[in-house]
Image: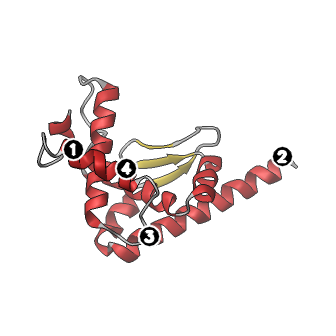
């Protein structure tokens, strides 16, 4: 019974991620090749989603939880991970302070996403994030991970 439920959870999460991927392609066809290179890998009990630059690791229960709370959040998460890879954020920064670098790259990616104003990717937290980014732009007019770091 437990195993059957886990299989159902994993299949549903896979379908949600497929829908999120399709949403990205519908709005940004030019990202299709990049999406094809970011391989989704199911990792039960991971508790989050992350990328190593070539794989998109996700906890299926985490995907279901964020989809239930805000369906656009999964498409946004997928796009967020993809942009990290395109901007090469996970690569070659071993000598930096990891927590500060992680925050800087997230700010840069979110600024990019918000500036695109894509339908189907808006989240409840966008207004608050936009306010923070506008304040940051007073000091860093063009937000990149390197400049924010």
Circles 2 and 4: CB atoms closer than 8 Å: no
Image quadrant in which you'd find residue 98: top left
Q: Label 1's element?
A: helix
Which label is found at residue 128? 4
Q: CA distance from mark 3 to mark 4?
A: 18 Å
Name the residue rendered at 53%, 66% in the picture.
18
| Residue under pointer 2 | 2
| Residue under pointer 1 | 135
Q: Mark 1 vs mark 4: which is more N-terminal?
A: 4
Q: Is 19 situated left or right of 113 in this image?
A: right
Q: Mark 3 vs mark 4: which is more N-terminal?
A: 3
Q: CA distance from mark 2 to mark 4?
A: 40 Å
**Res. 116 in view:** yes
Name the residue rendered at 58%, 63% in the picture.
16
Residue 76 % position (x, y): 43, 58
Q: Label 2's element?
A: helix
| Residue under pointer 3 | 120
Please tell me which residue lies in front, 119 or 130.
Answer: 130
Q: Residue furthest right?
A: 1
């Amino acid at each position: 019974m437990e195993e059957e439920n886990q299989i159902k959870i994993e299949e549903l999460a896979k379908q949600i991620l497929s829908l999120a991927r399709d949403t990205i392609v519908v709005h940004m066809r030019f990202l299709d090749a990049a999406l094809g290179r970011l391989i989704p890998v199911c990792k039960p009990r991971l508790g989050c989603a992350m990328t190593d630059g070539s794989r998109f690791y996700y906890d299926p229960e985490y995907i279901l939880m964020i989809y239930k709370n805000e369906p656009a959040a999964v498409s946004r998460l997928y796009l967020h991970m993809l942009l990290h890879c395109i901007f090469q954020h996970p690569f070659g920064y071993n000598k930096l302070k990891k927590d500060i670098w992680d925050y800087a790259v997230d700010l840069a990616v979110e600024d990019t996403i918000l500036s695109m104003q894509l339908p189907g990717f808006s989240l409840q937290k966008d207004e608050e994030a936009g306010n923070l980014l506008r304040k940051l732009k007073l000091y860093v007019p063009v937000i990149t991970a390197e400049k924010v770091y």
